[in-house]
Amino acid sequence: MSNIIKQRPALERKKSIVQELIKLINKYNIIGLIKMENIGLKQVQNIKKKLKGLALIKMAKNSTIRLALLNSGKPGLEKLAEYIKGPTALIFSEINGFKLMKFIKENKTKTYAKPGMKAETDIVIPEGNTGFQPGPMITELNELGLKTKIVSGSIWITQNTTIVKAGEEISRKVALLLTKLNIQPVSVGLDLTTVYDNGVVYNKSDLDIDIEDIKNKIKQAYISTYNLSLNIAYPIEENIVQLISKAYMEAYNLSRNSKIILPDTLGELLLTVENEVNILYNTLKERNPNI
């Protein structure tokens, strides 16, 4: 009996949280799932401040989030529940998923590495002064493959060195060294994994697009299409002036080469005849000076 009494407040609280989430679900058109791994409370608070006015983050147990998604009544939202894996939170917004993804990516911060983490990119220790005096630190650096020298009483690293490659696990020794050297190779922030946008569910791969790459592809497609329209003489607004100019020059060259007398070619044809006459006269003059 006592266990039932103890469970009631917990069940009521869970029910209250589910109802709160459902209200938010029905209020916003954009609902997303974000991973909460490797991110501290202080960092979450800073991110919430940056998102103020753009998005709202609500944290709850996965089972509670799943219940809210399945019971909201919003068409297609139940699909979002299938993507809940690991520590997860909900994010609500009115800006579309692509803009939300861009904002979140641009607002990640750097932090120190922890043992067992996987490197996002190659971790490079740059050449230069470490600020440490000669001592055990030299052995520590050399053991990790870093070349060193002593300059004016300080340990210097003599060349840029990749200490961990992208995708490799960061060892305890490497993590400690990176902290000592004040190198923060880990990006910390929200990880938007899935978004429900007015009935459509988008995965991270759908949302994480390279804007500059798309712009370049559009430019290249435009250039290719424009050149094709010129080559096949297909008139459109963008090429009509160049097509008319090209047609005029082709007609002009044809009439000139064919010696067809037209107002536009008459002057050049007369000049050509005059030059030919002069050449002929000079040739005859050379053969017969008495002409």
Image: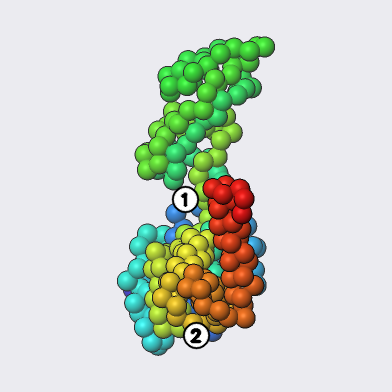
Using the rendered image of the protein, determine whether residue 25 is visible from the camera's viewpoint: no
Where does the image place residue 143, in percent across and percent down from the top left? 42, 19
Q: Residues within 10 Å of mark 2 (few under 14, many from 20)?
A: few
Residue at x-position 41% and y-position 75%:
232
Task: Say which residue label 2 marks.
Answer: 26
- Left or right: 111 as drawn, with respect to 38: right
Q: Toward the viewer: 100 or 8?
A: 100
Mark 1 residue crowding within 10 angstroms, few (<14) / some (14–19) / many (20+):
few
Secondary structure at numbered mark 1 = loop
Q: Residue 79 location in percent, x, y?
A: 34, 77
Question: What amino acid type should be assigned to the residue bearing mark 2?
Answer: Asn
* Quadrant including the N terminus: bottom left
- Res 87 quadrant in image: bottom left
Mark 2 lies on a secondary structure that is helix
* Extreme residue toward the right, this view: 152
Classify 283 as above or below 54: above
For residue 39, above or below residue 252: above
Determine if residue 269 is in view.
yes
Question: Disc 2 versus disc 1: distance between alpha carbons?
Answer: 30 Å
Q: Position of residue 244 (x, y in %)?
A: 55, 79
Residue 234 bears which disc, if any? none
- Kindly indicate the quadrant of the structure image that contains residue 179: top right
Residue 160's spot in the image, x, y percent? 51, 28
On the image, numbered disc 1 is attached to which residue? 38
Pick the front one: 222 or 135: 222
Q: Quadrant of the C terminus?
A: bottom right
Q: Earlier in the sequence, mark 2 or mark 1?
A: 2
Q: Is residue 79 left or right of residue 266?
A: left
- Residue at the farthest front position: 290
Q: How is the image coloured?
A: rainbow
Would you identify the image quadrant in which residue 77 lies? Answer: bottom left
